[in-house]
Image (cartoon, rainbow, N blue to C red):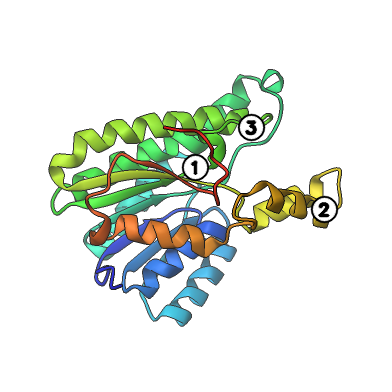
Amino acid sequence: MNLDLAGKCAIVGGASQGIGYGIAHLLASEGARVAITARRERDLRTAAEKMAAETGAEILPVQADCRLAADCDRVVKTVGDAFGRIDILVNNDGAPPLGDLSSFDDAAWQKAMEQNFMYVARMCRGVLPIMQERGGSILNITAISAIQPIPRFGLSVASWGAVIGYAKTLALEVARFSINVNTICPGYVDTQRLEKVFSTGDKPARQMRSELEREVPLGRIGSVSDIASLVALLVSPRGSYITGTVIPVDGGLFRAVR
């Protein structure tokens, strides 16, 4: 299926590796011009060069720390000046530390909200004046824990819960400008972050992976392409009638009846 992404201009956060890289790579493969952001400039530039070589698309690396308001503003201005338009915004980053809720002080909560919630609010606020001219698409990446809480994931659960409420409200407010806003909640995805979880657990990595695979009804850990494929549809003209949704992409882990 042709997703009609040729000529579209996108910003993808956290795109030097993992899910963000996979999303940016697929959008570029579909003909979009893509700006990618990440904190570590060396990794970001390496990713941009590889992506451009493999897709032939225009890739713009913009080093930024999404937790900083000034960096969010700079990303929007840099991309707007370079591309002349912004059609797609994919808000994606890592996650705060794990731990019992009672162990986190105010500073930890503030950092979590800056990274997960304020990042989304600032980037949306920045791109909306540009998108309102011709429509667009905003997609937020959270995690399955945002809708099915997991012990010790409380910082992420609370801050991504705020993102979901924000995104649903924003979808209502910007629909008249032909802008759709959606949030996806990946489950277990085969990335470096998941490998880190394997390596820091109290069980052998192979055993932990096997247990997670058995927990998933479809019987496997998700791939980056599983996430990127849905994102590409949702931010494309083909997905323009889908807005205000929260979609688990988890192989059936989420079991609630909604």
Residue 200: % across, % down: 80, 46
Which residue carries the number 2 mark?
Answer: 207
Between 213 and 8, the one lying in front of the other is: 213
The numbered disc on residue 34 is: none
Residue 142 - label? 1
Q: Nearer the viewer, residue 205 or 57?
A: 205
Few, some or many C-alpha atoms within 10 Å of disc 3 (few <14, some 14-19, many ≥20)?
Answer: few
Marks 1 and 2, the one that precedes in the sequence: 1
Label 3 vs 1, first from the N-terminus: 1
Check disc 3 and report the residue beneath it.
150
- Which residue does the image show at 20% across and 39% down from the upper left? 174
Q: Are marks 1 and 2 in contact (CB under 8 Å)?
A: no
In the picture shown, does residue 183 fall above or below 110?
A: below
Residue 214: x and y in percent read 71, 51
- Label 3 – label 2 distance at C-alpha: 20 Å
What's under tag 1, amino acid-wise?
A: Thr
Quadrant of the rendering where the C terminus is positioned? top left
Label 3 residue SS = loop
Residue 254, percent across and down? 54, 40
**Amino acid of disc 3:** Ile
Q: Secondary structure at mark 1?
A: loop
Q: Which marked residue is nearer to the observer: mark 3 or mark 1?
A: 3
Residue 225 appears at what percent x and percent y?
50, 64
